[in-house]
Image: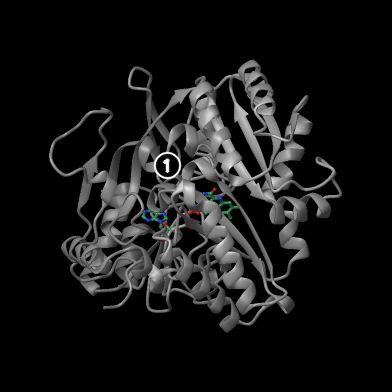
Amino acid sequence: MLEELRAALGLLGCLTGADVPEAARSDTSRCGRHLPLALLRPATVEEVSAAMAICHRHGVPVVPQGGMTGLAGGANPGPEAVALSLSRLNGVEEIDREAMARVVRAGTVLEAAQKAAEAEGLLLPVDLGARGSCQIGGNIATNAGGVRVLHDGMTRDNLLGLDVVLADGTVLSQLTRVVKNNTGYDLRHLFAGSEGTLGVITRAVIRLRPLPLPRGTALVALPDFAAVLRLLAMARARLPGLSAFEAMWRDYFGFNQAQLGLKLFPEPPPFAVILEAEEGEALETLLATAMDEGILTDALLAQSLTEARRFWEVREGHIMDAVLPGLINLDVSLTTGRLDAFAGACRQALLGRFPGAHVSFYGHVADSNLHIAVALPGGGTEAEVHGVDAVTYGVVRDFGGSISAEHGIGTLKRDWLGHSRSPAELAAMRAIKAALDPKGILNPGKVLPPE
Ligand SMILES: Cc1cc2nc3c(=O)[nH]c(=O)nc-3n(C[C@H](O)[C@H](O)[C@H](O)COP(=O)(O)OP(=O)(O)OC[C@H]3O[C@@H](n4cnc5c(N)ncnc54)[C@H](O)[C@@H]3O)c2cc1C
């Protein structure tokens, strides 16, 4: 098989043994350990198709790899699989200004695609912290969320068309640029969020938007979660250019503010929220009204980009990685109105099981997405970390929430998928997988738990 692959892809396109870089073993979750049989690096759609046809004939598993920034173990190969990296299939293709759309190859790094759009005076509306390494194909395969979801939706909402290579090498080309296209099943949405289990994404048509105006940024203090919800309703109604509404519970804001040596608010309030909107003046007026109505107890309006950056530094919480060894970042979603009730129940359950642990909450409230930062005393053993998952996802199930808002399932959340999906839904997913990949060679063992 390796000889056939070398003949199809050339020596640069098929690496084995010591030539396979360490980075091909694990994504950013760092839960992978295995050297794959080979690392395939096709440079064209035809090469992806040829590689898949060969692997299919030999019944060898294939694990698609993008920028390896995933946090769920989805791109990690086993020792019996070949890894298929899209990195050489990169670059932007033509732009269609009338359709506000651009064809982008799957291996293009997100930031490069964003810059190419900006050079045309347009915005590519997918954006996340890993922008410098993650790839468009990986963003689609994980249906990435990120920091613009409130305004522009998830990755799938900005996807007009797709080229996908199926398990047997068939190229399924649907590079459409139209917004309205009710011609039977919408196949592109099957592949968005499929985490490499249904096909290899090779090219995509991404919808572009006008570049946003300069934004106003505010950090506000609120007395309770009811006030957070009232502010969100006001902001949605009055700020059409609202692009961020990020809430931090007192435990998260207080911890990060102190670690950064900042005193943005003298005492950490029960809730702090960052708002960002294109309408700077309207934002200021809204804050004044909210203050008058007792929704806010304090408000800071950034007077410079440096000041706005300082607000975001607290929210991004990068310092936690340095000061909390073994930090666990959980990503779940619950109905917006129940986020605080969930946070209370989850905090109580985690601290009941792990006294002395750090537990704090923050999230994209408008997207019903909550992140939970947990650090166990002494870093925690593998079994204890598993225990954190069990406790948290148990509470998520009790609240009827989702165990993954934006990071995907991969291997790390696979065994909990039944907490958020019914047996009928799992059966439908298995039927789709069997129809598109009857030999089960595409990213086996990911997403779907064993029956
Ligand atoms: C600092 C940081 C910040 C992050 N912030 C966010 C965030 O705000 N929101 C968010 O949603 N995620 C976030 N992530 C997670 C991660 O960046 C995203 O999941 C991203 O979309 C993964 O893209 P990737 O190219 O790195 O994919 P990889 O990690 O390489 O792969 C992810 C999955 O997609 C599959 N895959 C990759 N490419 C293809 C392809 N071409 N065809 C088919 N399958 C493919 C893989 O098999 C795997 O299952 C963050 C990660 C980091 C490290």
Front residue (pair 386, 346): 346
Q: Nearer the viewer, residue 362 or 337?
A: 337
Side of 376 where 144 appears, left or right: left
Residue neighbourhood size for the residue with mark 1, other residues' Cα within 10 Å, grouped as few (<14), some (14–19), many (≥20):
many
Query: Relative to 6, is 47 above or below?
Result: above
The answer to whether 199 appears left or right of 219 in the picture is left
Q: Quadrant of the N terminus?
A: bottom left
Q: Quadrant of residue 416?
A: bottom left
Above-or-below relation of 158 to 409: above
Position of residue 248 measured from the top left corner of the image (x, y, whole percent): 65, 48
User: Does residue 204 appear in the picture of this structure?
Assistant: yes
Q: Residue 390: x and y, percent?
A: 49, 75
Residue at the image position 20 percent from the left and 54 percent from the top: 170
- Colouring style: one colour
Quadrant the C terminus occupies: bottom left
Residue 412 is at least partly visible in this image: no
Q: Say above or below: 448 vs 384.
A: above
Can you give x and y, in whole percent of width and height, for residue 173 in the image?
23, 42
Horizontal side of residue 31 vs 3, given as left or right: right
Query: In terms of secondary structure, where does tag 1 sit?
Result: loop
Instruction: Count all numbered tags in the image, as a single digit.
Output: 1
User: Could you tell whether 142 is left or right of 187 in the image?
Assistant: right
Residue 270 position (above or below residue 379): above
Quadrant in the rendering for residue 80: bottom left
Mark 1 CB within 8 Å of ligand 1: yes
x, y percent for residue 73: 48, 67
Residue identified by numbered label 1: 154
> In which quadrant of the rendered view does residue 372 lie?
bottom right
User: Residue flagged by tag 1: what amino acid is it?
Assistant: Met
Check the image and name the residue furthest to the left. 184
The residue located at (70%, 36%) in the rendering is 220
Q: Residue at x 26, y 27 (%)?
A: 178
